[in-house]
Image: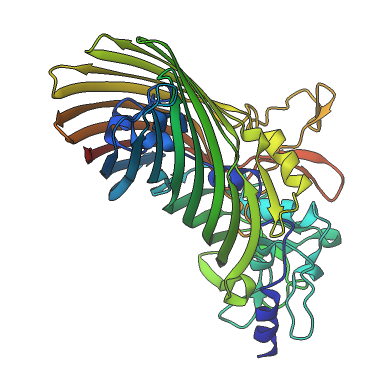
């Protein structure tokens, strides 16, 4: 009882240096092609056009283009397909992408013809994704990563990982190390997925002569929504301006399972005492796995300002700046692990353990997302058509993480600069008015990788693995406290098309978007390991490519009056 009461008291203490790091903050900073159907059907290339409810989240100067009030709602149906290592998962999701109102106030003035205000809800990002797969002939084990990175490299030893009734010696040791050590078995003994070897040095299950395979199953759920309050107008129908205040709501949940099946692993010969039991790999097998749960809730604010200049009737130029979104976040997470050990075909033990004695752990912190700049140009072709292009610069390297009082963490700041780079987004869209009532639309967008080349590349043959070109290289990837896994997007493309119908005050738009996203999943990081004898060597990770091939259909209904 005393142990459980003490565990509850400790839920208010920071048990790790960070709850989030560079790749976790990146995950919370994503946006995608969402909004009204007209906006989506032209791939979001609206920065110089305006006159659409979605422009409040992109270039708020677009609100100044309005001459009439606008009220609309957009429904969406996502048909998603995820593939990884030969496994395919299909999902269907219904959502509301956009709801908005713009009020146009006409002024009896040639210099300032109108001033407008607007309110919109816009889905910025859907986290819904589910992928899984297997990796055969693995060259390393997550158990070795946990032992090396979370214990040996951090200066901990076995004594730091015990939980006893009368003291709490974790001293900020990562939960993954605690969970995989000192695991109770059904025979009332104790074993470990990580175990002490010579001189107290911790070691995983994988070493010379060990072979095996791994399996991963990742399910993500949630959304990032933005509520916009905007104000704008125009000067002499030449220069349009807009200001926007955004309030964001983020809700993200991750369920991740990882397991390994190992032949000739280095396991304990029995389960009586962690230090007295010998380690063996003769005729052994091991099945072990880890489950991680993470729920993140956040609220944030940002500001946007924009301009659109129309030097001639046929040409429009736009520019917009987005401040970072400043989030207050709260994580809830949990982990458990199991181990089955076999020798000569017979089971030696079956062990199971939960992090934090089975209690969910909570951590509050702050992040700021990248600032963004959007430059746009559009050409109007008579009364029939238009072409538009946007370029967006996303300063991923400027993201920040801080404690719940907003104090920035310099270690995470350095990691963000080391791992991440700016991403560039190009959007091209066009519209052709077939009749006064019907329009055809199409577009394309491309987003570059947010991660520096080489972060996952450990090819140090012939060079000092710690130094390249005279600079220290250490791309070990810190992650959420209980979960060594991380993921990121390489490239994202959207191919779009759509139809539009106008009749008096009523309008209806239909859009189709084909999204192609190529991502990388890593169960844990590549690391450079220094063993108990001071020898530095490379420990590879277990990873896989993930391909999203998603199709979405959206319908916007609205009135202008």
x, y (%) of residue 325? 58, 44
Position of 458 relative to 444 (above/below): below
Disc count in the image?
Answer: 0
> In the image, what residue occupies the spot 16% across and 29% down?
502
Displayed quadrant of residue 140: top right
In the displayed orientation, state which residue is furthest to the front: 108
> In the image, what residue occupies the spot 54% across and 56% down?
298
Evaluate whether residue 33 shows in this view. Answer: no
- Left or right: 184 in relation to 560: right
- Left or right: 207 in relation to 530: left
> In the image, what residue occupies the spot 65% across and 91% down?
1
x, y (%) of residue 42? 32, 25
x, y (%) of residue 55? 40, 33
- Image quadrant occupied by the C terminus: top left
Please name whichever residue, 155 or 356, is drawn nearer the observer in this view of the structure.
356
- Left or right: 110 in relation to 275: left
Evaluate whether residue 102 shows in this view. Answer: yes
> In the image, what residue occupies the spot 72% across and 59% down?
405
Displayed quadrant of residue 480: bottom right
Please name whichever residue, 235 or 458, is drawn nearer the observer in this view of the structure.
235
Displayed quadrant of residue 482: bottom right
Give the image's coloring scheme: rainbow
Please name whichever residue, 359 or 561, is drawn nearer the observer in this view of the structure.
561
């Amino acid at each position: 009882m005393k142990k459980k009461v003490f565990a509850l008291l400790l839920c208010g203490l920071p048990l790790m240096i960070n709850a989030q790091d560079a790749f976790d903050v990146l995950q919370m900073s994503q946006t995608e092609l969402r909004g009204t159907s007209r906006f989506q059907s032209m791939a979001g290339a609206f920065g110089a056009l305006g006159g659409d409810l979605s422009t409040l989240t992109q270039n708020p100067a677009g609100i100044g283009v309005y001459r009439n009030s606008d009220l609309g709602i957009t429904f969406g149906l996502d048909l998603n397909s995820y593939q990884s290592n030969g496994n395919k998962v299909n999902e269907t999701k219904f959502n509301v992408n956009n709801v908005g109102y713009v009020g146009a106030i006409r002024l009896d003035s040639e210099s300032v013809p109108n001033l407008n205000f607007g309110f919109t809800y816009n889905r910025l990002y859907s986290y819904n994704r589910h992928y899984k797969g297997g990796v055969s002939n693995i060259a390393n084990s997550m158990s070795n990563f946990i032992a090396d990175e979370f214990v040996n490299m951090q200066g901990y030893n076995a004594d730091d990982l015990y939980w006893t009734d009368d003291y709490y010696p974790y001293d900020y040791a990562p939960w993954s190390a605690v969970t995989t050590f000192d695991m109770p078995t059904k025979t009332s003994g104790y074993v470990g997925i990580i175990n002490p070897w010579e001189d107290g040095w911790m070691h995983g299950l994988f070493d010379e002569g060990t072979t095996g395979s791994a399996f991963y199953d990742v399910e993500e759920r949630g959304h990032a929504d933005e509520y916009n309050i905007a104000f704008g107008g125009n000067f002499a129908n030449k220069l349009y301006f807009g200001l926007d205040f955004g309030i964001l709501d983020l809700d993200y949940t991750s369920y991740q399972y990882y397991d390994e099946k190992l032949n000739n692993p280095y396991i304990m010969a029995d389960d009586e005492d962690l230090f007295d039991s010998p380690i063996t790999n003769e005729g052994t097998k091991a099945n072990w796995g880890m489950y991680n749960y993470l729920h993140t809730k956040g609220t944030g604010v940002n500001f946007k300002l924009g301009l659109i200049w129309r030097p001639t009737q046929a040409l429009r130029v736009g520019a917009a700046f987005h401040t970072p979104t400043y989030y207050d976040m709260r994580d809830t997470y949990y982990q458990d692990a199991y181990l089955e050990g076999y020798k000569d075909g017979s089971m030696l033990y079956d062990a199971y353990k939960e992090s934090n004695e089975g209690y969910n752990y909570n951590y509050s912190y702050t992040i700021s997302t990248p600032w963004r700049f959007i430059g746009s140009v559009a050409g109007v072709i008579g009364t029939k058509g238009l072409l538009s292009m946007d370029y967006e610069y996303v300063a991923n390297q400027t993201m920040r993480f801080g404690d719940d009082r907003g104090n920035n963490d310099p270690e995470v700041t350095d990691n963000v600069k080391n791992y991440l780079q700016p991403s560039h987004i190009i959007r091209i869209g066009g519209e052709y008015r077939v009749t006064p009532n019907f329009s055809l639309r199409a577009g394309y967008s491309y987003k570059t990788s947010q991660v520096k080349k080489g972060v996952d590349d450990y090819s140090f043959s012939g060079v000092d693995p710690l130094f390249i070109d005279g600079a220290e290289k250490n791309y070990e990837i810190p992650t959420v406290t209980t979960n060594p896994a991380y993921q990121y997007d390489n490239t994202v493309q959207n191919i779009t098309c759509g139809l539009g119908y106008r009749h008096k005050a009523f309008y209806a738009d239909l859009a189709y978007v084909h999204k192609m996203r190529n991502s990388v999943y890593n169960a844990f990081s590549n690391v450079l390991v220094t063993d108990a004898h001071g020898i530095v060597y490379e420990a590879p990770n277990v990873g896989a490519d993930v391909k999203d091939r998603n199709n979405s259909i959206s319908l916007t209904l609205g009135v202008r009056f």
